[in-house]
Amino acid sequence: MLRSGFRRFVPARGRGWASRLLDAALWLALWLPPASEAALSSYGRAKVVAFAAAPLLAVAVAVGRRWPLAALGVPVALGLALSAKLFTPLYWPALAVFGFLAGCRTAAARPVLWFLGSVAVAGLPLCVVAERDLWAWPGLLLTLLGAAGLPWLLGRYRRQHAELARLGWRLADRMEREQQVVAERTRYRERARIAGDMHDSLGHELTLIAVRAAALEVDATLTADQQRAAGELRAAAGTATARLREIIGVLRADDEPADEPVAAPPGESAETLVERARASGLDITLERQGETSGLPPMAALAVHRVLQEGLTNAAKHAPGAAVRVRLVRTGKPPAVTLTVLNSPPAAAPLRGVVSGGSGLVGLDERVRLAGGVLRAGPAPDGGFELTAELPATAAPPPRAAGDVSRLTASGRELTRARRRVRRQLSQAVVAPVAALAGILLLMLPVSLASSYFSVLDRGAYDRLTVGTPREEVTPRLPLFTRDGPPDGAPAPPRGQDCVHYSTSLMSADAYRLCFVRDRLVSKSVVKHGP
C-alpha cells in the first residue's frame, strides 16, 4: 500500500527515470563478473563472450518486463557459449535474477517449463558433440535446476502470494458488503414481523373494543346519544383495525406471505414448545429458575423466537445431540436469560437442509429491539450455544446493531487464501526435490553409457604417434572421454590440454593423451592409486 501511494504522487516522468536507473544498475551488476574475469583472464573465448555479454545483457534487462523468457534466454546462451554444461559461475547471477523475474512476471508456468525442458533436451546433443563428455549433461541439468529453476519457483511463489492476497481482500471486501446488505434486509424483515406481532395483539384488542361498542349500540337502557356514541366508537375501532392491517401490509417483504403466522400461538409457554419438540424426537432437558411469567410483550416474543430457533437449529444441524434449555429469572437487575446448548452432533446434518445464514441476524435484531443481547457461537465441548439476555421490565433503548457472527466472511476468505499460498509453497519445495531425484536416477544409465563408450582399444592406442594433428587423432578415439583422471594420477603437464580414456570397461586405469596447439605431444598410461 505504501508503494502504491508513493507511485501515486510521483510523476510519470519521474517513475520512468527511476525505472531506467534501476535497469542500468541491474545491468551493471550482472555484467561486472564477466567483465572483471575477461579483464584478468587470458582465455580468448571468455573475452569475446564477455564483450558480447554487455549489449546482450542490456537488451535482456530492457525487454525483461515484456518478454521475460527472452531475457532468461540471454544468460543461458552466454553460459552455453563458454561451457556446454553451463558450469560458468560468471553468468549464474544473471540466470538467477532473470529466472526469478520470469517467475514474478509470467502468469502461466507452462511456457517457462517448456523453455527449461527444451534447454535440457538440447543440452544432450550439445554435450555429446561439443564436449564429447556425456557426464557434462547431468552437470547442465543440475546447473539449470539450481541457477534458474529454483529462482523461478521462488519468483512464481512471490507472484502467486501477491495475487492471492489481492484476490482474497477483494473477495473479502465484496462479501462483507453483501453480508451487510443481507443483514440489513433481514433486520427489516424482522422488524416487519415484529410489526405483524403487534398487529395481531392490537387487532385482537381493537376487535374486542368493537364488539363491546356494538353491544352498547343496541343496549336499550342507553339513550340515543349514548347509542350513537357507541356506534361511532365501533366504527372508529373498525377503521383503526383496517388502517393497521394496511400499514402492516406495506411493511411486509414482497416475498413474505401476508397470512404468515409471525406471533407465538396464544398461551404457548416454553414448556409447551419444549414438549412439542420432545415429541418429535429431540432429547431436551428444560431447567427453570425463578418465575418467567409477566414479561413485557417484546421480551416474551423474543424468548419464544430464540427458543424456537435454537431447537430448530439443533434438530437440523446436530441430529441426535442432547439439548439443554435453561430459563433463568434474575432480580437485580430484573432480567431473564435463555440458553439453548446442544452437545456435538451424533450424526451428520440432515441431507437437503440448507442454512440461509440469516436466522441469527433476525434473532439478534428482535432481541436488540427488545433491549437485550444475543450471543451465539461454539461451545467449549464442541457443540453450539445460543444465549439471549432480556430485560424483565420495560425495555431500555435498543443497543446498536452488530454482527452476531464471530467468523466474518473476510476472515474465512483470508484463511482459504493462506492455505492456497502454503500449498503453493509446498509445491515449490517438492518440485526441485523431485527434479533432483530424477537427475540422480538419470546418472546411473549415463554412467554406464559413458563408461562403455569411453574405452580406448589397446591397438588403437599403440597406433597413435606423437606429433599427429588432432583432427587425424580424433576419428580413432572413442565417442566420449573418461570422467576425469584416475584417483591418485599425477597432474597433467602445464600448458597441455589432456584427455583421458578408459583402458577397459572394468579397469580403473586410463590412457592420457595430451595436446599442444592441436597436436599430440604425449601419450601415457595413468595407473589408479597412490
Image: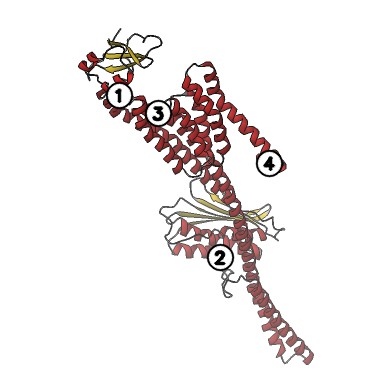
Q: Nearer the viewer, residue 345 or 437?
A: 437
Amino acid at circle 2 = Ser
Of pointers 1 and 3, the one earlier in the residue sequence = 3
Q: Nearer the viewer, mark 4 or mark 1?
A: 1
Q: Contact (CB < 8 A) between labels 2 and 4?
A: no
Q: Nearer the viewer, mark 4 or mark 3?
A: 3
Q: Picture quarter containing residue 464?
A: top left
Residue pointed to by mark 2: 269
Looking at the rendered structure, the secondary structure element under dot 4 is helix
Of pointers 4 and 3, the one earlier in the residue sequence = 4
User: Any mark on residue 448, and which?
Assistant: none
Of pointers 2 and 3, the one earlier in the residue sequence = 3
Of pointers 2 and 4, the one earlier in the residue sequence = 4
The residue positioned farthest toward the right in the image shown: 225
Q: Where does the C terminus fall, quadrant-wise?
A: top left
Q: Contact (CB < 8 A) between labels 4 and 1?
A: no
Gap in Å between the C-alphas at discs 4 and 1? 57 Å
Residue pointed to by mark 3: 140
Residue pointed to by mark 1: 480
Looking at the rendered structure, the secondary structure element under dot 2 is loop
| Colouring scheme, one of rainbow, by chain, secondary structure, one colour | secondary structure
Q: Picture quarter containing residue 526?
A: top left
Residue at x 43% of width, y 56% of height? 349
Q: Nearer the viewer, mark 2 or mark 4?
A: 4
The residue positioned farthest toward the left in the image shown: 459
Q: Picture quarter containing residue 389?
A: bottom right
Amino acid at circle 4 = Arg
Looking at the rendered structure, the secondary structure element under dot 3 is helix
